[in-house]
Image: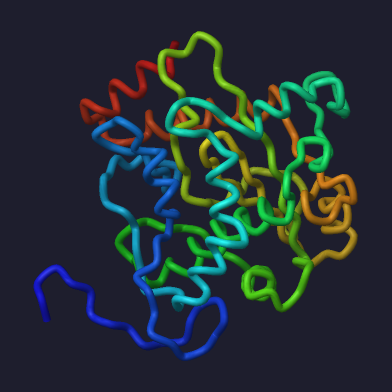
Amino acid sequence: MVRGKVPPTVEDCRICKRRRLLRNSHVIPRGVYRRVQRDEKFSVNIVQRKAILSQAQLKAPLFCSDCEQRLSKRGEDYFLSNCLQRDGSFPLFFRAEICSPSLKAIRPQAGYWKADTLGADYEKIVYFGASIFYRTWAAKTKLPNHQISIEFEPTAGEALRAYLNEECQDIPNVALNVSLIPPVIGSPRDFRYAYSLPQEIKTHTLGSSVRFYTSECLGFAFTLVSSDDPGMISAMQTNCLLHNPDHPIFISSEMLRATVNRQINWVRNSQPTAHLRAYNETHRN
């Protein structure tokens, strides 16, 4: 074996379940890495509520070539053309600002746009969102030293897999909420150029049957909720980008504050390297 090369892996693909030669799949999509790193010498990846500075791209033998192409065509390519760009532009948020009169208020500091009002392909955004949660979960056993902590109940994990494999047009027992994150006015650093590995948020009051997961990515905040309680998941799906007929894309000052505070806490709980101290100081302002 050539030193540094990953040996070929022939196993069941984690999406289509066919026994195939597997690619060394990116846990964080490669195009996302390029944006997160931007012009910095490091990137911040969030795992287990801590900020980990790394240039290494998390990879594992997960998916076959056909499924890799499906992930790109069904979601990743579209997401990368509409999220926060390397030059600071943010196409979907720009369209949202233009369409501000169409924002439907749900409380004083929160509202949503219908996806079609923004000209947004909600199915591709849902597909990308579902893929980042699933690929992280699928990689957990392959990368035991990378502190991936996400756990799904079997029904939720299988529902995501089947959806990504185009076996169904729905994700039963799962809701996926999507919010746009505006810039923090006056901040010397755009904190949105970050990616947080999906993780479970356990501090909620809705009972043990409900599980919340969150991930932030280049100006988007994704929240996945799963439950085996039909009544509870039905209520959660009223805000779901896939299940709600309006296909809502949210914005809220509460989400902005929660996202910023979460990142500040992640950094403060991490090793005090020079880079992290600098990152922390910019977040204090």
Please identify the quadrant where the N terminus is shown: bottom left
The single residue placed furthest to the bottom in the displayed view is 19
Pinpoint residue 33: horizontal percent, then vertical percent.
38, 46
- How many numbered marks, from 0 up? 0
Vertical comparison of 28 with 261: above or below: below
What residue is rendered at 23% in x and 80% in y? 7
Residue nearer the viewer, 188 or 151: 188
Image check: 284 left or right of 228? left
What residue is rendered at 53% in x and 51% in y? 199
- The structure's colour scheme is rainbow
Please identify the quadrant where the C terminus is shown: top left
Image check: 16 left or right of 163? left
Image check: 216 left or right of 116? left
Residue nearer the viewer, 6 or 212: 6
Residue nearer the viewer, 26 or 150: 26
Vertical comparison of 193 with 229: above or below: above
Pinpoint residue 17: horizontal percent, then vertical percent.
54, 85
Pinpoint residue 204: horizontal percent, then vertical percent.
69, 44
Q: Quadrant of residue 144?
A: bottom left
What residue is rendered at 35% in x and 16% in y? 281
Pinpoint residue 15: horizontal percent, then vertical percent.
55, 76
Residue nearer the viewer, 91 or 154: 91
Image check: 160 left or right of 22? right
